[in-house]
Amino acid sequence: MQEAKERKDLASTLRSYALITCVLVFIALASFLIVPQGSSVKSCEQILLQNGRYDCLTALALSSLNASVCGYVQGPYADNCYALVAEKSDNVTTCGSISDNASQGACVSLIAVPQQNYTACAQAPEPYASKCIERIALQTNNQSICSYASDNDTQTECSSILAIRNATGSGNATYCEEVTDTSNRTINDQIIANFSSATNSSAYANNQSGYFLSSLAMLPNVTYTAMDYCYTTLAVQTSNPGLCDNVSSGEVQSICQTAAGAQSASNTTANYTQELAACAQTGSYMQECDESVTLAQAVLTENATMCATLPSALGTQCYTLLASTYNDTSYCGYIYNATAHDSCVSGS
């Protein structure tokens, strides 16, 4: 009798253990389903290798769009985590948690520019906020947006680029009056470089005279203003040497008149022979003029051999222009300076 009772108690105990085991298995399974593959902050922090731990936390932050998880990551890994979450969630506010100013600016631009939301650019520190606004203004061809840039140089560049674009697009010289006449070479170079690369004007793009004038501006010993560049470009484009009277720089005015005159004489895009002949009339500026014609010819005819005939610094710019114009980094292989070579490759 006693033995039968003991067997019954043992069976009851085993059933209880089995029930408890089932409950525990159910809880474990439920936890696994709620947090797939153990992807919780706690489980990520149990990973010994730092890179693996940070990758786990970043993945968790992305999957949950929970930027606070990035707080468990350190240094540049944290910045990357915040940037990824901000981009995926289209939330510029998250960019504000990034510690590096340049990375924070890039994060904001990556979200604000595609949305053409220039007010969102204010989330970035300067000068990145102003550069973000400039990109949207150029993208939308809206000069009024430039005024929201608080960085004065960027605001000047932005409005001047669009004024030149409007002038060359419409053939209306009054737009050139809106272009800065500062003698600051850095600002002028930036305006011309950005206009040359960003313009959609069919009258300028792939135009021999346009390349000629852009390359002329690259020469270090030529003095000019962005306003001079606007009038000169329009004078050549419209075959109107009279517009050159508005050019303040004597050397550029001389080149403007001869280039526009050559264009007017043929009533078509001036050929290289005509441009070189025009250069011969510029007196002491003939070498600079010849070099800019050679650079324009090299780029438009895809002739890298001509780049080798130019002075070293200008030859490097020639190869770089070929690479960026035709999206072909093989041209960068002609550049022996490591820094210039890397810049050529990254810009193509």
Image: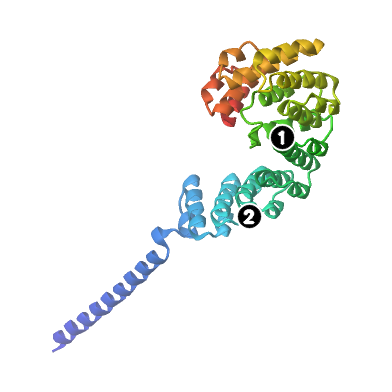
Pointer 1: residues within 10 angstroms few (<14), some, or many (20+)? many
- Dividing the picture into quarters, in which one does residue 292 lie? top right
- Dividing the picture into quarters, in which one does residue 310 lie? top right
Which three-letter amino acid code belongs to the residue tagged 2? Answer: Val
Comparing marks 2 and 1, which lies closer to the viewer?
1
Q: Quadrant of the C terminus?
A: top right
> What SS does tag 2 mark?
helix
Which of the two residues, 27 or 8, is positioned nearer the viewer here? 27
- The residue tagged 2 is 92
Q: Residue at x 55, y 20 (%)?
A: 302
Which of the two residues, 306 or 29, is positioned nearer the viewer here? 306
Q: Which mark is residue 168?
A: 1
Q: Quadrant of the N terminus?
A: bottom left
Position in image of residue 240 (x %, y %): 77, 26
- Dividing the picture into quarters, in which one does residue 324 lie? top right
Report whether 333 appears left or right of 16: right
Which of the two residues, 37 or 229, is positioned nearer the viewer here? 229
Q: Is residue 316 visible?
A: no
Position in image of residue 331 (x %, y %): 54, 21
Position in image of residue 152 (x %, y %): 81, 42
Which three-letter amino acid code belongs to the residue tagged 1? Answer: Thr
> What SS does tag 1 mark?
helix
Q: Earlier in the sequence, mark 2 or mark 1?
A: 2
Pointer 2: residues within 10 angstroms few (<14), some, or many (20+)? many
Q: CA distance from mark 2 to mark 1?
A: 36 Å
Which of the two residues, 178 or 81, is positioned nearer the viewer here? 178
